[in-house]
Image: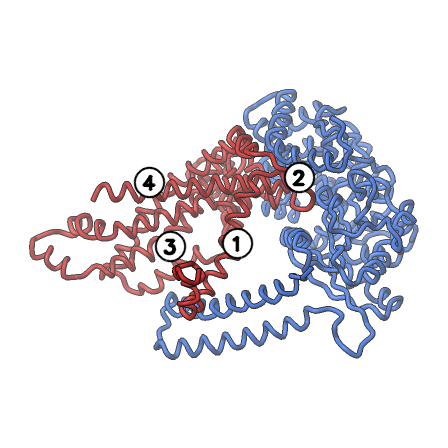
Chain colours: A blue, B red
C-alpha cells in the first residue's frame, strides 16, 4: 500500500509555512495599526517581508534538527525523549552515567507542559507518526494508555519486561498491565508516598512537639488532629490546613475510588469521623477555605500562615524549588495523621510508541533510567521523584542521609517506610474527575451546613453524575478486553 | 461527457487557471475545516476513546447529553454569565467608543491600546491576577471591603454562587475593549455631514447619539453581539483557572461552563471523544440558532 505518512508530513510542513508567513505579515500589520506607530504601506510590507524571511530561515534550520538519526557519517543512534518539565532536569542529571554505558546513543529532549504533552502524544499515536521514541505518561493518564495498541508490548522479546517485575513496587507495576493482562506497555518511574508536611517553627511556638515521631503519635486520632488544629490556628491570621475538605480527601489520596466492578467505594472506616473533623475545622475557622494549589495557599505556606498540608512526597521538591526556597529548617515530614497509612499520590511512567524506529535504543534508555540504582538515584537527587524501583532505596548514602532543608530529618527513611506499606488500587479513567468532586462537593456541603452523612451522600451523587459518561467509556474498554463480567 | 460538455470536470478543466488560483483556500479549508466538521458529526454517533475500538451507539450520546443534570447546569451557567455580561459589554463598549470619538480626549491612541490589551493578553495570566483580586484571605477586593466594615466574602468558594460574578467581571473586562475598537471604527465611518445637518436642525448631543450614531452602528452592534456570544460559548480558561483546574466548576458547579463540560469529557479530562463530539455539535447548533435569531430580530425592526 502507498505510504501516505511522508506525504502528510510534507503537506503539514508546507501548510504550517504558509500560516507562519501570513501570520508574520498580519502580526506586523496589526502591530503597526493598533500601536499606531505609523509609516507608509510600502515600508510596512518590506519590513514584513524581511521578518518573514528570517522566520523561514529559522523554520528550516529547525526542520533539520528535528530528524533524529539521519546525520550521515556517524554511527550514533539518536532517540527523542518527550515529557513535561522537571522530567528533563531529571534525565539530564542521569545522562552522564547513561552516556558512559551507551556511548553510541544520543538523546534529544522535547519537553512541554503536562496537558499539551499528553494531547500531542495521543494525537500522534492515533496519526501513526510524530511521537517521540520514549514518552512520559503521568499517573492520572495511565488508565487511558495501558490498553493502547499503539504502544510497544514490553512483555515480548527482546524486552522481556517481566524479568524486572519483582524490582518494582508491585501496585505500581500492576497498573501497567492492559485490562486483559496480556500486555504491558509502560514502566513505572516514580511513586508519591503521601506524608504530612508541617511547620516546625509554628508548632514550637504553640507549645506542640516538633519531632516527627511525636507529632505522628499526637495526631494518631481525629481528636489529636483537632487538638493540633486548635492549638496552631488564630482565626483570620493563621490556619491549620488550606481547606477543611482535605481532612476527608486524605482517605482518598490513594486514588482508590473504585473497585474491580467499577463501584464507587465511598464508605470506608473513619469517613464519618473525618467529615465531622472537617465540619469542626470549618466552623472554628481553622482552615483557610482555599485550594491547596491556589496562590493564596502558596503564600501562606511560605510565611507560616498555613501550618501544615497533606500531600505526596514530591511536595518536598515543590517546597525547596518553588513555594518556600528560603524555608530551610522550617519544615518537617511525618506519616499521615489519623491512622491513614500506605497511600500514594501520582507518579509517572515511560512508554515506547510502536511507530518508533529506534525501539532498542529506547528500551536501553528506559532500562538504564528506571531499572538501575544509579539512573533512578541520580534523578531522585535532582528532582525528588521517589523511585518505584525498590533496589534504589538500598543506597544508604542517599536514603539514610539527613535532609538539611527539613532540619536534618532523614526524609528518605520516612518515604521508604510509607512506600513499603503501599496498598494496591484499581486505576480508572474516572479518578481525576472524582478527585475534583471531593473538594467541591465537601465544600458545598459545608457551606450548606449539612451533617457528615449528608455530605457523604452529596459527594456520592456528585461523583456519579460527573463521571457517568466516562464510566461508560471505561466499561467499553473493559468489554473490548473481554474482562467485563456484567 | 464529451458531447454534453457541461459536466463538473469539464468546468474545472475549462477554468483551470482560475480554479488553481482559488485552490489554496479550498484545500486548506477541506483539511482544517470541512474534514473536522464531517468527522466530528460522524464521531458523535460512536463511543470511542481515541485509541482502541469504536462502537456505534446511534443517538445515545445525544440522549445522555440532554438528560445529564450537569450539562443543563453548565448550559444555565453559560447563559447566565453571557447574558449578564453583555450589559456592560454593550453599554461600556459604546460609551468608551463615544468618548474616544468625541473631541474631548487627548492621547486617544494610548487609551485605545489600554482598552484593547485584555483581548490580546494571555487568559491564564489575567486569571491569575483576578484570582488574587477575588481571593478569600488575601484578596484585594476583600481588603477594600474591609474598610467599609464588610466581612470577608468567599468569592471563589462558598456555596458556588459568587464565582459567577468573578467570571462575569473577567468576561466583560475582556470584551469591552474589543467592542470599543469596532464601534469606534464604525463611528468614524459615519459621515460628519449627517451630524452637521442635525446640528443645523437644532439636535443636541443625546439626540444625535440615539437617532444617528446607534442606528448607523446597528449592523456593527449585531456583529459584535454574535462575536461575544461565540466568546460566551467558548468560555473556558477563566472559570477553569479560577477553580484551580477543577473539572467540576467549584462548589455546586457554580462556575461550570459548557466548554469546561465538553473538555472534561475529551480530550483533557476523560477520553469520551464520541460524546464530546456530540456535545460540540449541540453547542455549534446553539451558536447558529442564536446568530440567526439576532439577525432576524434586527431585520424585523427595520
Both marks 4 and 1 on one chain: yes
Label 4 element class: helix
Instruction: Report if the CB atoms under discs 4 and 2 are less than 8 Å apart.
Output: no
Q: Disc 3 or 1, which lies upstream in sequence?
A: 1
Of residues A131 and A304, the one nearer the viewer is: A131
Q: CA distance from mark 1 to mark 2?
A: 24 Å
Q: CA distance from mark 4 to mark 2?
A: 39 Å
Q: Disc 4 or 1, which lies upstream in sequence?
A: 1
Check the residue under mark 1 and report the chain it is in: B
Instruction: Report if the CB atoms under discs 4 and 1 are less than 8 Å apart.
Output: no
Residue B200: x percent and y percent?
7, 57
Label 1 element class: helix
Q: Going by the image, does B22 lie left or right of B188?
A: right
Instruction: Report if the CB atoms under discs 3 and 1 are less than 8 Å apart.
Output: no
| Residue at the spot of label 4 | B293
Q: Is residue A229 above or below residue A352?
A: above
| Residue at the spot of label 3 | B178
| Residue at the spot of label 2 | A432
Total labels drawn: 4
Q: Residue at x 62, y 31 (%)?
A: A468
Both marks 3 and 2 on one chain: no
Q: CA distance from mark 3 to mark 4?
A: 23 Å
Check the residue under mark 2 and report the chain it is in: A
| Residue at the spot of label 1 | B125
Amino acid at each position: 500500500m502507498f505510504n501516505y505518512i511522508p506525504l502528510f508530513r510534507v503537506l503539514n510542513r508546507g501548510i504550517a509555512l504558509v500560516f507562519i508567513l501570513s501570520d508574520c505579515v498580519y502580526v506586523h500589520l496589526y502591530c503597526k495599526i493598533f500601536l499606531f506607530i505609523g509609516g507608509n504601506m510600502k515600508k510596512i510590507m518590506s519590513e514584513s517581508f524581511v521578518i518573514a524571511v528570517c522566520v523561514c530561515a529559522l523554520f528550516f534550520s529547525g526542520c533539520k534538527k528535528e530528524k533524529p538519526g539521519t546525520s550521515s557519517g556517524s554511527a550514533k543512534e539518536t532517540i527523542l525523549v518527550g515529557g513535561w518539565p522537571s522530567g528533563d532536569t531529571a534525565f539530564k542529571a542521569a545522562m552522564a552515567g547513561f552516556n558512559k554505558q551507551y556511548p553510541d546513543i544520543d538523546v534529544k529532549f522535547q519537553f512541554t507542559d503536562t496537558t499539551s504533552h499528553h494531547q500531542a502524544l495521543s494525537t500522534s499515536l492515533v496519526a501513526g507518526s510524530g511521537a517521540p521514541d520514549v514518552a512520559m505518561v503521568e499517573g492520572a493518564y495511565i488508565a487511558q494508555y495501558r490498553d493502547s495498541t499503539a504502544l510497544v508490548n514490553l512483555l515480548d522479546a527482546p524486552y522481556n519486561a517481566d524479568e524486572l517485575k519483582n524490582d518494582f513496587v508491585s501496585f505500581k507495576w500492576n497498573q501497567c498491565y492492559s485490562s486483559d493482562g496480556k500486555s504491558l506497555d509502560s514502566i513505572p518511574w516514580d511513586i508519591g508516598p503521601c506524608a504530612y508536611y508541617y511547620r516546625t517553627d509554628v508548632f514550637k511556638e504553640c507549645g506542640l512537639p516538633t519531632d516527627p515521631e511525636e507529632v505522628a503519635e499526637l495526631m494518631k486520632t481525629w481528636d489529636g488532629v483537632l487538638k493540633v488544629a486548635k492549638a496552631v490556628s488564630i482565626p483570620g491570621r493563621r490556619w491549620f490546613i488550606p481547606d477543611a475538605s482535605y481532612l476527608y480527601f486524605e482517605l482518598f489520596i490513594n486514588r482508590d475510588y473504585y473497585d474491580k466492578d467499577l463501584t464507587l467505594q465511598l464508605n470506608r472506616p473513619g469517613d464519618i469521623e473525618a467529615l465531622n473533623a472537617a465540619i469542626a475545622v470549618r466552623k472554628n475557622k481553622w482552615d483557610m477555605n482555599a485550594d491547596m494549589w491556589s496562590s493564596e495557599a502558596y503564600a501562606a505556606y511560605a510565611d507560616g500562615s498555613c501550618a501544615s498540608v497533606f500531600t505526596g512526597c514530591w511536595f518536598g521538591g515543590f517546597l525547596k524549588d518553588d513555594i518556600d526556597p528560603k524555608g530551610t529548617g522550617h519544615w518537617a515530614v511525618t506519616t499521615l495523621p489519623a491512622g491513614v497509612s500506605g497511600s500514594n499520590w501520582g507518579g509517572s511512567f515511560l512508554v515506547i510508541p510502536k511507530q518508533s524506529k529506534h525501539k532498542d535504543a529506547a528500551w536501553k534508555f528506559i532500562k538504564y533510567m528506571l531499572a538501575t540504582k544509579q539512573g533512578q538515584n541520580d534523578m531522585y537527587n535532582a528532582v525528588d521523584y521517589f523511585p518505584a524501583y525498590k533496589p534504589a532505596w538500598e543506597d544508604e548514602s542517599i536514603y539514610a542521609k539527613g535532609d538539611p532543608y527539613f532540619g536534618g530529618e532523614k526524609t528518605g527513611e520516612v518515604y521508604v517506610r510509607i512506600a513499603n506499606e503501599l496498598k494496591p488500587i484499581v486505576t480508572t479513567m474516572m479518578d481525576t474527575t472524582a478527585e475534583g468532586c471531593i473538594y467541591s462537593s465537601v465544600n458545598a456541603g459545608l457551606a450548606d451546613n449539612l451533617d457528615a452523612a449528608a455530605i457523604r451522600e452529596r459527594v456520592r451523587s456528585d461523583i456519579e453524575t460527573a463521571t457517568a459518561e466516562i464510566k461508560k467509556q471505561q466499561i467499553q474498554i473493559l468489554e473490548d478486553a473481554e474482562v467485563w463480567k456484567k | 461527457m464529451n458531447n454534453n460538455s457541461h459536466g463538473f470536470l469539464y468546468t474545472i478543466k475549462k477554468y483551470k487557471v482560475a480554479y488553481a488560483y482559488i485552490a489554496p483556500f479550498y484545500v486548506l479549508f477541506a483539511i482544517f475545516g470541512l474534514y473536522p466538521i464531517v468527522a466530528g458529526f460522524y464521531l458523535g454517533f460512536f463511543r470511542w476513546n481515541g485509541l482502541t475500538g469504536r462502537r456505534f451507539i446511534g443517538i445515545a450520546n445525544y440522549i445522555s447529553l440532554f438528560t445529564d443534570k450537569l450539562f443543563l447546569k453548565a448550559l444555565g451557567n453559560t447563559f447566565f454569565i453571557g447574558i449578564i455580561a453583555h450589559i456592560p459589554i454593550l453599554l461600556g463598549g459604546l460609551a468608551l467608543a463615544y468618548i474616544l470619538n468625541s473631541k474631548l480626549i487627548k492621547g486617544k491612541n494610548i487609551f485605545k491600546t489600554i482598552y484593547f490589551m485584555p483581548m490580546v493578553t494571555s487568559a491564564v495570566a489575567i486569571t491569575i491576577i483576578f484570582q488574587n483580586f477575588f481571593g478569600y484571605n488575601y484578596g484585594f477586593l476583600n481588603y477594600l471591603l474591609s474598610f467599609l466594615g464588610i466581612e470577608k466574602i468567599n468569592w471563589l468558594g462558598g456555596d458556588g454562587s459568587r464565582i459567577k460574578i468573578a467570571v462575569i467581571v473577567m468576561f466583560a473586562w475582556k470584551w469591552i475593549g474589543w467592542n470599543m475598537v469596532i464601534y469606534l471604527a464604525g463611528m468614524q465611518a459615519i459621515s460628519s455631514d449627517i451630524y452637521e445637518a442635525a446640528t443645523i436642525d437644532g439636535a443636541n448631543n443625546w439626540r444625535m447619539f440615539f437617532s444617528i450614531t446607534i442606528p448607523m452602528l446597528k449592523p456593527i452592534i449585531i456583529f459584535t453581539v454574535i462575536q461575544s456570544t461565540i466568546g460566551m460559548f467558548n468560555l473556558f480558561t477563566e472559570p477553569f483557572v479560577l477553580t484551580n483546574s477543577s473539572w467540576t466548576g467549584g462548589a455546586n458547579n457554580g462556575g461550570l461552563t459548557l466548554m469546561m463540560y465538553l473538555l472534561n469529557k475529551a480530550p483533557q479530562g476523560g477520553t469520551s471523544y464520541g460524546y464530546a463530539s456530540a456535545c460540540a455539535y449541540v453547542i455549534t447548533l446553539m451558536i447558529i440558532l442564536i446568530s440567526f435569531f439576532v439577525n432576524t430580530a434586527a431585520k424585523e425592526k427595520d
